């Protein structure tokens, strides 16, 4: 199930946050830039991810750190759902890559919960993830998120400013 929320994902009570990342560790614009400033360790996990850019698509990296908006910890996931980036009028989102990255994130969430690293995970994504600067088609992406959420039996909250 997905739930639409009004508000800033980074100021929410979600203790799992995911965002679409390119495979070149830039985190220079959009919510990625805001995440890099608020949670520098998430940038480090992106920069230090051992795979070469060509091998990242469809995977994810993450960092667990102190939650800036509450008590406890937060896991921030870099979802490699686009290979490159730019301002050209083309679609950068790779739907198969994003689906794979979302599924991998959900598997890690299960492990983080089982190991009590992140108890009671609340998963948040930016509304229109992959459809903003990466120019993916939102109807496709939203349907994909719902399928992944339903398959793993977890609610995903989509935060819209």
Image: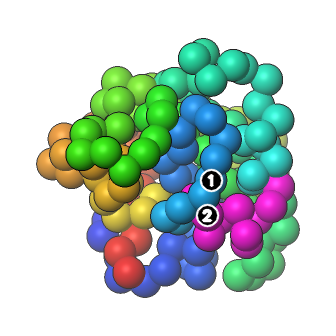
Q: Do callouts 1 and 2 mark residues in contact (Cβ within 8 Å)?
A: yes
Residue farthest to the top? 55
Q: Nearer the viewer, residue 64 or 149?
A: 64
Report the span colored magenta: 32-41
Residue farthest to the front? 88
- Residue located at (46% from left, 41% from top): 85
| 94 on left or right of 154 | left
Q: Nearer the viewer, residue 111 or 69?
A: 69
Q: Nearer the viewer, residue 154 or 138?
A: 138
Residue 59 in percent (x, y) is at 57, 27
Q: Which residue is mark 2?
A: 33
- Residue located at (59% from left, 81% from top): 11
| 69 on left or right of 123 | right
Residue 34 in percent (x, y) is at 62, 70
Give the main secondary structure, helix, strand or loop, of the magenta stretch: helix
Mark positioned earlier in the residue sequence (1 or 2): 1
- Residue located at (34% from left, 24% from top): 96
Q: Quadrant of the C terminus?
A: bottom left
Which circle marks residue 27 in the picture?
1
- Residue 35 inside the magenta-drawn segment: yes
Q: Can residue 112 be seen?
A: no
Q: Residues within 10 Å of mark 1 (few under 14, many from 20)?
A: many
Q: Can residue 32 be seen?
A: yes
Q: Secondary structure at mark 1?
A: loop
Q: Nearer the viewer, residue 65 or 92?
A: 92
Instruction: In the rendered view, tell whether residue 152 sits above or below residue 116.
Output: above
- Residue located at (19% from left, 46% from top): 137
């Amino acid at each position: 199930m997905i739930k639409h929320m009004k508000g800033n994902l980074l100021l929410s009570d979600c203790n799992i946050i995911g965002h679409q990342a390119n495979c070149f560790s830039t985190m220079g614009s959009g919510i990625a830039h805001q995440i890099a400033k608020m949670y520098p360790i998430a940038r480090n996990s992106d920069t230090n991810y051992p795979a070469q850019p060509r091998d990242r698509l469809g995977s994810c990296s993450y960092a667990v750190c102190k939650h800036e908006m509450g008590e406890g910890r937060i896991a921030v996931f870099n979802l490699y759902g686009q290979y490159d980036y730019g301002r050209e009028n083309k679609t950068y989102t790779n739907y198969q890559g994003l689906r794979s990255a979302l599924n991998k994130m959900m598997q890690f969430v299960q492990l983080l919960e089982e190991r009590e690293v992140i108890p009671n995970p609340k998963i948040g994504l930016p509304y229109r993830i992959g459809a903003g600067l990466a120019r993916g088609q939102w109807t496709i992406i939203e349907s994909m998120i719902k399928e992944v959420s339903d398959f793993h039996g977890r609610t995903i909250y989509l935060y819209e400013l």
